Image: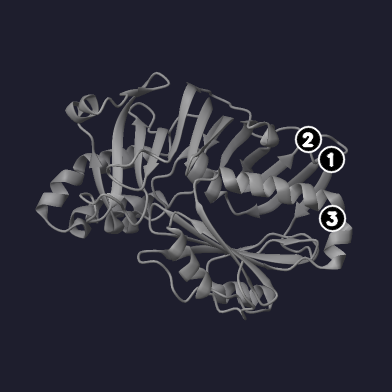
Amino acid sequence: MSLEPRARWLCMLLVTPLLAGGPARAASTTEADRILSAVMRQDRPAFEGQRQYRLVRQTAAMEARMHVAWKDERNYRVTIQDPPKLSDVRVWLDDNRAHVHFPMENLFFRNDNPAGASEVGATVLGQVTQDGAALVRNYDLRVLDEAERERRAMPGEVAGEPCDILEATPAGQSGNDTWSRPAHRFWVARGSGHIMREERSWGSGLAPFFLSWYDAWAPRRTPVIGVPVPRDVNRVELAAASRDNSFRTFRSAAEAEKAIGEPVAVPRDLPAGFRLVGIQCPTFYRSRLILQSYTDGLNWLYVQYRGKPNLWVTLVAGAQAVRLVDKFQELAFQAPYNYYGAEKGEQIVFVYGDLPPDELKRVTDSLPLPSKGRS
């Protein structure tokens, strides 16, 4: 989970009552501030745990299980155990540098750039905020009291840890049957400040479409983060200076354009409340991909585009590329997002996130790339 600097967060807590709009809201957010402050503590204990995951897509329910070893938000490892197609895929952060090992493909991506892994943090570990001011501005926060938890038969403990329950609902929509963005409900451990369980839903009367929780959790003084990879593994070293395989992160389109020497297309029509977090420009076998991350303080929007595969890339990557595409598709389908894809000129566009499909289409249509029809 990538977080804002603590000093900025503490300042946000001080101004929360003003941003929230009046004394009534200020009084009701005091308990939420306490819980959010606990989540942001720098001294949260290291741990290891087993995390369960359940996602419902229309009538299909997908389940996953993974092992988590966590030292801090810049150093952790997630190993997928189920489903079988993804078994033993491992992602870990080493001083905020994300590495990925695909054992079945005998492939290891090693990233020398401190770019974090926001999607892993948001989908696996749970995430409260990357932008505290936006969270307060765009969502109504409240803590469920004991009477409400009992009335709604909500567990007060997760993996043996007593928890507070924090809800974030799209601002001004708490009484609506359906919401414009997913609401999140977090079970936050009172002792450690870790997020032990998360639920997401699209409306007050709707069952959660996504659940993620620990069924085993224990503090560990020195959890093992990095993992050995086979000596004969196919390595893809991602370094900023490499022409073939690189990974660079930028704070703005202008900064990215200056570095890579070509225009970067950004959407002209962003959903209300969303702002740019960063632009990643990874290159694989000299084929560049642009990935833009946006947040409204809680939910996420990702805009990705790349050139169509050329013959040279196909010959270099071969069957390995085909297997990886299948693996990436499986990973994407397991993530709790909606998706929209299109072809625009010589580019393939893929937009996904915590938004209804019609909004994803609108974002895609506003991306200033030449268009030759959609898929």
Rendered residue at 72%/40% (across/down): 101
Q: Position of residue 90 (x, y in %)?
A: 67, 37
Residue 210 vertical placement versus 238 (above, below): above
What's the amino acid at mark 2? Val
Q: Residues within 10 Å of mark 2 (few under 14, many from 20)?
A: some
Residue at the extreme top of the image, as rendered: 160
In front of the other: 362 or 162: 362
Q: Position of residue 167 (x, y in %)?
A: 29, 42
Q: Secondary structure at mark 3?
A: helix
- Give the mark nearest the N terminus, 3 or 2: 2
Which label was assigned to residue 233? 1
In front of the other: 59 or 267: 59
What's the amino acid at mark 1? Val
**How far apart are the alpha carbons under marks 1 and 2?**
7 Å
**How far apart are the alpha carbons under marks 1 and 3?**
15 Å
Q: Residues within 10 Å of mark 1 (few under 14, many from 20)?
A: some
49 horizontally vs 131: left or right? right
Q: Which residue is mark 2?
A: 229
Which label was assigned to residue 317? 3
323 horizontally vs 97: left or right? right
